Image: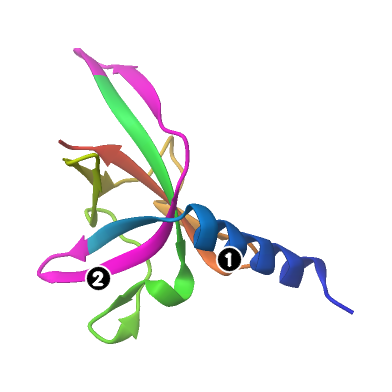
Amino acid sequence: MSTFRDNIRTQTAKIRDTAGVLIVYSRDTESVVIPRAIKFPGRRQSTMDVVAIDSAIQNWGIAVDDLVLSGSLATPARGDVITFTEEGVTTTYEVLPQDGDSVSHLTAGDSQHYIHTKQLT
């Protein structure tokens, strides 16, 4: 009998297989092509300190087993970069914590990194 966690892992893998997008995940000089990342709906965020800052927030789902840097499984870190090309336009995102949260957390039965990013270009 399957557990709930196993069912979530299976369903998430199906989503990546049918709706996943190709991205490049980079840290310093290391990069890995992720062939099936989940691009969650983005949103705009405004903050007001000394000046108003408007930014685009984008969250990503990446299978834990796909995020391999220097031959080892990696954990998302602040400052890592995700590059995504759609209809000939390349957009760059920086991995950053969101609203006091960590930069990522595990979802889908611990099989997927849910990563917070902010659009750079």
* Residue 86 locus on image (x, y percent): 26, 42
Q: Rounded to the nearest whole Å, what is the CA distance between mark 1 and mark 2?
A: 19 Å
Q: Amino acid at mark 2?
A: Val
Tell me, for residue 49, which label it has, or none. Answer: none
* Residue 69 locus on image (x, y percent): 26, 77
Which residue corresponds to mark 1? 13
Q: Nearer the viewer, residue 14 or 44?
A: 14
Magenta stretch bounds? 26-53
Q: Does residue 42 sit above or below 40 in this rendering?
A: above
Which residue corresponds to mark 2? 32
Between disc 1 and disc 2, whose residue precedes?
1
Magenta highlight on residue 52: yes
Q: Residue furthest bottom?
A: 71
User: Quarter holding the C terminus?
Assistant: top left
Quarter where residue 88 is shown: top left
67 displayed left or right of 92: right
Magenta span: chief secondary structure: strand
Residues at badges 1 and 2 in contact (C-beta under 8 Å)? Answer: no
**Residue lying at 36% horizontally and 71% vertically, measured from the top left:** 67
